[in-house]
Image (spheres, rainbow, N blue to C red):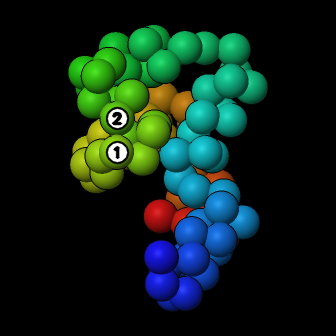
Amino acid sequence: MCNVSKQRKVRKMDKETVEMKIKDIIKNKGITQAFVARQAGIKEADLSLCMNGKRKFKVSEFVNICLLLELKLEDFEGVVA
């Protein structure tokens, strides 16, 4: 693995990602990803892929999740996309 790739991996591990932030909020609210998916109009499988970093959120999905969880863009300040 080249040095640049290692640096990127370390940086990403050191910083909170959007997915990590949403996972923490879901856990703290005591709800499930299945509930979030249903309420936000997202397939459970798609939400799971997004939460595991294997798929990016569509803007509409992200907005629906933020509305559901009562989040503002400021809640993601300093979070890596």
* Residue bearing mark 1: 54
Residues marked 2 and 1 touching at CB (< 8 Å): yes
Q: Which mark, by number, is residue 6?
A: none
Using the image, determine if residue 27 lies above or below residue 32.
below
Using the image, determine if residue 41 lies above or below residue 7.
above
- Residue 9 position, x and y percent, is 57, 69
Q: Residue at x 45, y 37 (%)?
A: 51
Using the image, determine if residue 44 lies above or below residue 21.
above
The answer, for residue 41, to whether it is visible in the render is no
- Residue 79 position, x and y percent, is 61, 64
Amino acid type at image mark 2: Leu
Q: Which residue is drawn at 25% across and 49% down?
A: 58
Mark 2 crowdedness (10 Å alpha carbons): few <14, some 14-19, many ≥20: some
Q: Residue at x 68, y 35 (%)?
A: 24
Answer with left or right where residue 68 lies relative to residue 74: left
Q: Which of 64 and 81 is in front in this view?
A: 81
Answer with left or right where residue 48 lies relative to residue 11: left
Q: Nearer the viewer, residue 30 or 66?
A: 30
Q: Which of 72 and 77 is in front in this view?
A: 77
* Residue bearing mark 2: 49
Q: At numbered mark 2, what does the secondary structure look like: helix, strand or loop?
A: helix
- Residue 63 position, x and y percent, is 37, 45
Answer with left or right where residue 56 lies relative to residue 72: left
- Residue 72 position, x and y percent, is 57, 52
Amino acid type at image mark 1: Lys
Residue 36, quarter of picture: top left
